Image (cartoon, rainbow, N blue to C red):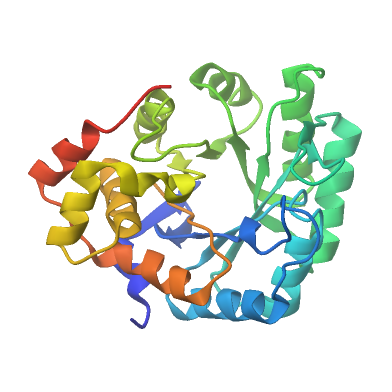
Amino acid sequence: MKQIGRQAGTFLIGGDMEVCRMGYGAMRLTGEGVWGPPQDREEAKRVLRRAIELGIDLIDTADAYGPAVNEEIIAEVLAPYPKGLVIATKVGNTRPGPGQWVPDGRPGQLRARCEDSLRRLRLERIDLLQLHSVDPKVPEDDQYAALAQLQKEGKVRHLGLSNVSVEQIERARRHFRVTTVQNRYNVKERSSDDVVDYCAAKEIGFLPWFPLSTGKLATGEALSSIAQSREATAAQVALAWLLQRSPVMIPIPGTSKLEHLEENTAAAALRLTDEEMHSLEALGSGA
């Protein structure tokens, strides 16, 4: 299974930062409700190390995961970072408590959180900084301008967005080059189909969060049937579908277990037929 993640192919973020199209979402390396430290810190460390061994070179995190805890563990385990490893983080959400997410897009807060992430991650520049969500209480242009300024100052290499519509992406592009978009998307939940297609047309990387729908995937008859015939898991088939759905797709499945990390990453080697892709297409919902 060595470097199997590389079989997913690669994508050039911003046209100059090549990453494997099988990433890893580190959010689960926290406590319940994405709050506090992970229950098994040593297992969390093993997962991060193994992700690199499997060929994964994009790890997605956020200052809000923990909060702060997730970035701290990543730096503890992986810094100084291997050449080519991209640590993507996000700013723009605050955490009053477990399971609670409150947008805060005030320019001063975005700057402060970016600088905090630089310190925690032990970086001089963040390769990919994403706006976690647009704050409806703050003018969009102010939020985008704040991110653009961080990039101009050299604190950030590339900028991305999360939880956005096509219209919001277009407005952000007036301020900076949007290199990635991260929306909720999987084989069953496809309300962002238009965003995926827009990203493909504009060569913007699309990072689907919640790519495995946390256990709900196994209820699909078509998915289960394909998985059985391929001697694969439903999760592997779902990830293979994402990879073939669009050349800009960069799945970031998350787990706190070594076994699941290896299982998920193995999906990089699975190729679905056109017939299998079409049968899975019918599972989708725009809801």
Foreground of the two, 185 or 99: 99
Where 17 falls versus 45 (above or below)? above
Does residue 80 appear in this view?
no
Which residue is nearer to you in this view: 109 or 183? Answer: 183
What residue is shown at x 79% (from left), y 69% (from top)?
122
Quarter of the image for residue 185 reads: top left
Q: Which residue corresponds to the image point at 85% horizontal and 63% vertical from the top-left?
A: 119
In the displayed structure, 214 sits above or below 21; it is above
User: Residue 222 vs residue 173: left or right?
Assistant: left
Q: Position of residue 252 (x, y in %)?
A: 49, 54
Residue 130 picture quarter: top right
Percent position (x, y) of residue 120?
A: 82, 64
* Quadrant in the rendering for residue 104: top right
Q: Can you see residue 57?
A: yes
Horizontal side of 277 relative to 284 (left or right) equals: left
Quarter that holds the N terminus: bottom left
Horizontal side of 211 relative to 84 (left or right) equals: left
Could you tell me residue 134's position as x and y percent? 70, 26
Which residue is located at x 51 percent, y 73 percent? 51
270 vs 200, left or right, is left
Nearest the viewer among 216 and 162 is: 216
How many numbered marks appear? 0
Image x and y of residue 196, in percent:
39, 32
Q: Residue at x 17, y 60 (%)?
A: 228
Quadrant the C terminus occupies: top left
